[in-house]
Image (cartoon, rainbow, N blue to C red):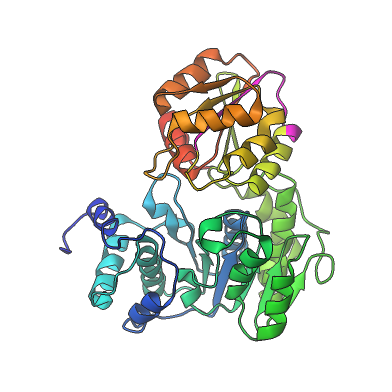
Amino acid sequence: MAASRSLSDWLTWLETLSPAEIDLGLDRVHDVLGRMSLQRPDHVFLIAGTNGKGSSVAMTDALLRAAGMRIGTYTSPHIINFNERIAVDGRYATDAEIVSAFETVEDARNGVPLTYFEYGTLAALVVFSDAGLDAWILEVGMGGRLDATNAIDPTAALITNVALDHCDWLGEDIETIAGEKAGVMRPGIPVVYSGTDVPRAILDRAEEVGATLLLRDRDYTLDGIPQLGLLGEFQVGNAAAVLALLKASNIAAATDPALVESVLPTVRLTGRGQLIEQDGVQWLFDVAHNPAAAGALADLLESNRPDGATTAIIGMLDDKDVEGVVQALNAHIDRWICVSADSHRALPAAELGRRVANACNRPCLIADSLDAALEVARRDAAINDRILVTGSFYLVGPVLERLGVASP
């Protein structure tokens, strides 16, 4: 790959690099890492779980930076631009920084067939190493045990929760999926679990490897959490787990009550419970793409109920539980508009519409394009109505871009 290529050229090329978009395993990443001399920080946090990872990363980052530390965050997928995945001290990496990191990875790759995600993960680590940071916060892409981020040994980890998602790769039941997520544990490190129902596989793995497992209501509580900037009652549990993670890592400055009180109300996250108003209509953006996330979104819809009707624009990928998501939300929706998300893995709008209609028994429109869906939603919305955009990162991002909505 020519060094003079743009970031867009690199990303297009990466999509052709491996025949498998998802190919779980650490051997390839370890192989390439072994040929790179990376400067590792004092703290590496791995954030795993089914839902709530992005929120947990955002709160951890904000608290650590407010405490005076220099932080790198790696998250996925992005909402609009690839640069969002790699941030240093709250600033997205530039095209030039990412291209330089890609060149470093390519020099070390030696023909190893990395996936798009693996290549991006290694590039993030290069950016962080070059920046000489105090801590890296790495969001696990899928599962944990075999995810590329798990090639870096963490100093502490957080598992938000376990629910059914990515079943084709992680397993068909909660315990099997939990076993995959528990793969982020290491001997002697603190691991916080923020869910209320703790799978047996989490407990067993902690005991097996000798990790220090911290559980809600046993080792930490939800007491003292201030009003949060992130919407949804479930975010209180995420915030409490983040504080437990930082306390267990002996970073006292980041958990000072006055600092927590001032920082957590300011944290926002694009596409997660993001609420705006345009022309008297409430827009709510949330990337809920599995039944558990949809259940949390349903609670948010109920607690922020408008005076008018709610239209949901939905697009989903072909490996998702459409019926589970729709049924969780349906009581709060007056009509649905189905559209194809912006991904080659998206369910076609017609097929999505058929499944939504069968599951919800409410009006369901099939839109020929995203622009058509937005035109209908805005045309028919009255003052105090609400438009929900949900189902996939690959829908929420393009809608935010079309509406000209800045990151919160």
Q: Nearer the viewer, residue 80 or 317?
A: 317
The percent coordinates of residue 213 (x first, y second) are: 73, 76
The percent coordinates of residue 330 (x first, y second) are: 68, 31
Quadrant in which residue 363 is drawn: top right
- Residue displayed at 74% across by 71% down: 200
Quadrant in which residue 237 is drawn: bottom right
Would you say residue 312 sits in the magenta stretch?
A: yes
Horizontal side of 5 relative to 86 (left or right) equals left
Q: Is residue 339 visible?
A: no
The answer to whether 337 is drawn above or below residue 107 in the figure is above
Region of the chain picked out in magenta, as a range: 302-315
Would you say residue 298 sits in the magenta stretch?
A: no
The answer to whether 252 is drawn above or below residue 371 in the figure is below
Q: Quadrant of the N terminus?
A: bottom left
Q: Nearer the viewer, residue 62 or 76?
A: 76
Q: Is residue 322 visible?
A: yes
Count every numbered label the image shows and give the total: 0
Horizontal side of 69 relative to 202 (left or right) equals left
The answer to whether 349 is drawn above or below residue 242 in the figure is above
The answer to whether 104 is drawn above or below residue 340 in the figure is below
